[in-house]
Image: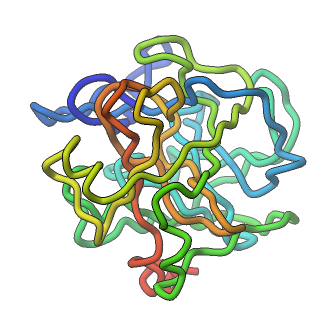
Amino acid sequence: MAKTLHRLIVSVVVSALASIFFIAPAANADVSPMIVGGTRASTSTYPWVVYLASTSGSQFCGGTLTKANKVVTAAHCVKGRTPASTRVVHGRDDKQSTAGTVANVTKIWVHPSYTTATAGYDVAVLTLDRNISSATLPLATPQDTALYTAGNSALILGWGTTSSGGSASRYLLKANVPLTSDSTCKTAYSQYSNTSMVCAGFPQGGVDTCQGDSGGPLVFGGKLIGDTSWGRGCAAAGYPGVYGRIAPYYSVITAQL
């Protein structure tokens, strides 16, 4: 994720030569997630993981296919973007290849209460112009409280940077990180709220999401339990990654599906 006070990834496409990843404008917020300490992964194993791209093909965030034509991602990835400027790429491990499907976006829904990632409600749903023939990932429900137990080893995936401020990965990467307790996350971040967020990471750091991973999945128990949202730096000791907690948003997300 990003490398300042918060890990928000603000994707802004300014020109073909400019980077689309920027640290969040919030004075004390850092937004930029990519998998640090990860290993190569395949979309054939995780067919529901996708990435978001500009019309020129530049990847800027991740997402999860939760229905044949619906992708769940982070609100900060798409707030202010138009459907016409956004693409979803499915089934492509290597960003330099032409494998898989590139779908247009016909609608962007951002949680109506979203303002900034650090305030919660960092969830969005994209509607695609086609149905993708693929396995999808179910959402965590309000009854799935056990999925959020501290210590659960959750899966993270993304094409983001492998170090804070570093280069983005050409290939899909994965890693596992333990969910942290609410008290641990609150100690790291005063803005943390367990009604809308969940944290994951090792106390010593070393493994994390980073810039470019925003919106991508946090998975446990075969369900989408979170979307990569924000954090301080990437893989820093004492600062776990913060993810949007999907279960509380189950009803509003389902309404979009």
- Quadrant where the N terminus sits is top left
Horizontal relation, residue 114 to residue 144: left or right: left
Q: Which residue is found at the position 75% from the left and 66% from the top?
A: 130
Relative to residue 256, is residue 188 depicted above or below? above
Residue 153 locus on image (x, y percent): 61, 52
User: Could you say where residue 211 lies in the image, as x and y percent from the top left?
Assistant: 45, 28
Q: Residue at x 36, y 57 (%)?
A: 181
Location of residue 104 with respect to 159 vertically, above or below: below
Q: Residue at x 87, y 65 (%)?
A: 133
Count of numbered tags: 0
Q: Toward which corner of the image does residue 170 lie, by quadrant?
A: top right
Type of colouring:
rainbow
Query: Which one is in front, 204 or 200?
Result: 204
Q: Position of residue 253 (x, y in %)?
A: 48, 78
Q: Which residue is the extreme one toward the left?
A: 27
The quadrant in which the C terminus is found is: bottom right
Residue 111 drawn at (x, y percent): 33, 70
Residue 37 position (above or below residue 114): above
Judge left or right: residue 166 versus residue 27.
Answer: right
Q: Residue 8 or 195: which is nearer the viewer? A: 195
- Residue at (29% x, 66% y) in the render: 194
